Amino acid sequence: MQRGGRKGYAVYRIVAADARAPRDGRFIEKLGMYNPNTNPATVELNFERALYWVEVGAQPTDTVRNILSREGVYLMKHLRVGVKKGAFDEATAQTKFDAWKQDKTKAVEAVRATEAKAKKDAAAKSLEEEKKVNEAIAKKVADKKAAAAAAAAEAAATEEAPAEEAAPAEA
């Protein structure tokens, strides 16, 4: 894997490289990209080339091995070995792989749906809390305005009363 991206947002290239090459150094072939920052992690992989490299004996790192396993490269390698040994034919192997891939896709979609629902629920809860806070603030403002209006009315009533008393005395 070769690290890329910016500080705090790493994105990796999956590459075939000589074991003696440095981590971000020379490589033989780029096989794909891995972005661990998304949920679930995003993997773009050239499946056929990755399968070729695994079949010719490439030794992936632990992380890349896990990625290739999740993408089905090792399952396809296993199925191809079964075809070579005569356990089943190519069509059966492809059917098994397609069934596995569909199950995998459904699982990923379920995770994405769960994440989306959780995000939507959190936003709704936040909105409700904000509405409650806004209502409390609006009530305080209304109470303050009512108190100010009552004080102004009382002050106006006290000013009118002495003026009325003073007017008849002068007449």
Image (cartoon, rainbow, N blue to C red):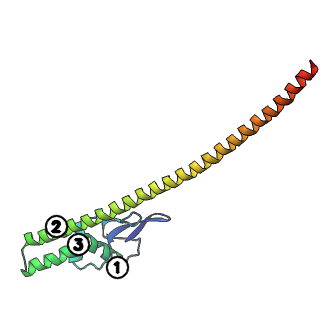
**Who comes first in sequence, dot 3 or dot 1?**
1
Tell me the quarter of the picture where residue 103 sits: bottom left
Q: Residues within 10 Å of mark 2 (few under 14, many from 20)?
A: few
Residue 112 pos. (x, y %): 33, 61
Disc 3 versus disc 1: distance between alpha carbons?
Answer: 14 Å
Disc 2 versus disc 1: distance between alpha carbons?
Answer: 25 Å
Amino acid type indicated by mark 3: Val
**Who comes first in sequence, dot 2 or dot 3?**
3
Is residue 45 left or right of 88 when viewed as pictured?
right
Amino acid type indicated by mark 2: Asp
- Image vertical order of residue 154 relative to residue 18, above or below: above
Numbered disc in front, either 2 or 1: 2
Q: Is residue 71 visible?
A: yes
Which residue in the structure is indicated by mark 3? 73
Q: Which quarter of the image is occupied by the N terminus?
A: bottom left
Asked whether 83 or 163 is in front, the reply is 163
Disc 2 versus disc 3: distance between alpha carbons?
Answer: 12 Å
Q: Residues within 10 Å of mark 3 (few under 14, many from 20)?
A: many
Q: Residue at x 65, y 48 (%)?
A: 140
Which residue in the structure is indicated by mark 1? 62
Which residue in the structure is indicated by mark 2? 98
Question: In the structure shown, which secondary structural element does the residue marked by tag 3 occupy?
Answer: helix
Question: In the structure shown, which secondary structural element does the residue marked by tag 2 occupy?
Answer: helix
Amino acid type indicated by mark 1: Asp
- Image vertical order of residue 160 relative to residue 24, above or below: above
